[in-house]
Image (cartoon, grey):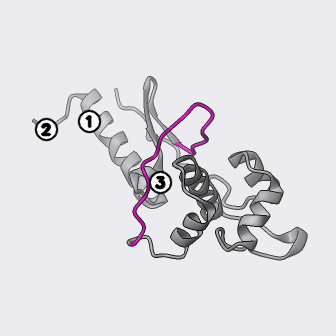
Amino acid sequence: MTIPPPPEPVEPSDRFSLEDLSRLTGLRARTIRFYIQEGVVERPHGIRRGAWYTGQHLEQLLAIRRRQAAGLSLEAIREMAHRSADEVAAPPVRRRPGDIEVWSHVVLAEGLELRIEPGRAGLSPEQLRRLAMECLQVADRIRSGKESS
């Protein structure tokens, strides 16, 4: 019995309103605007009521929350935001009840799922998609008994 191929992955909306970001991060809109004004978060695309935000903005805001939870001051976070990714040593992440994380949840088959936090895993959306597809193929081979030893 062959399992039908999975549907193409559906991309989440890459456009967020200020209200969306506020809901997803637990930060007040006023706080998000402050972070933008302080240069800790990039400016939105568009202007005024037509302004919109991307996954990059969401990741920046979640990184701020993680760094604050690790005890860093806003000044230190601002400094880190202006350095290249290679220069920034991420502080240890202490997860606590109530922390907000964005996870990708890929259903490979009934009873078989893959959960990944792409930021901590260091995966781009394309790499995540590739990993999911390869996991699907491996699971299919194993279930069909055609796995290589």
Task: Give the residue pinned by disc 2.
Answer: 148
The reply to whether the C-beta atoms of the residues labelled 2 and 1 are less than 8 Å apart is: yes
Q: Residues within 10 Å of mark 1 (few under 14, many from 20)?
A: some
Point out the residue furthest to the left here: 149
Task: Give the residue pinned by disc 1.
Answer: 141
On the question of residue 44 being in view, the answer is no
Judge left or right: residue 56 versus residue 143.
right
**Residue, x 73% and y 54% (percent of image)?**
21
Q: CA distance from mark 3 to mark 1?
A: 29 Å
Judge left or right: residue 103 versus residue 46.
left
Across and down, in percent, residue 138 comes to: 28, 39
| Residue situated in front as seen by the camera: 50 or 8 | 50
Task: Give the residue pinned by disc 3.
Answer: 119
Three-letter residue code for mark 3: Gly
Q: Residues within 10 Å of mark 2 (few under 14, many from 20)?
A: few
The reply to whether the C-beta atoms of the residues labelled 3 and 2 are less than 8 Å apart is: no
Residue at disc 2, secondary structure: loop
Nearer-N-terminus badge (2/1) = 1
- Up the image or down, 109 lies above or below 132; here it is above
Dominant secondary structure of the residues highlighted in magenta in the image: loop
Q: Which mark is residue 50?
A: none
**Residue, x 67% and y 74% (percent of image)?**
39
Q: CA distance from mark 2 to mark 1?
A: 9 Å
Q: Residues within 10 Å of mark 3 (few under 14, many from 20)?
A: some
**Residue, x 77% and y 58% (percent of image)?**
31
Nearer-N-terminus badge (3/2) = 3
**Residue, x 46% and y 25% (percent of image)?**
110
Three-letter residue code for mark 2: Ser
Across and down, in percent, residue 147 comes to: 18, 35
**What range is drawn magenta here?**
87-103
Residue at disc 1, secondary structure: helix
Given this view, does label 3 or label 1 mark the residue nearer the observer? Answer: 3
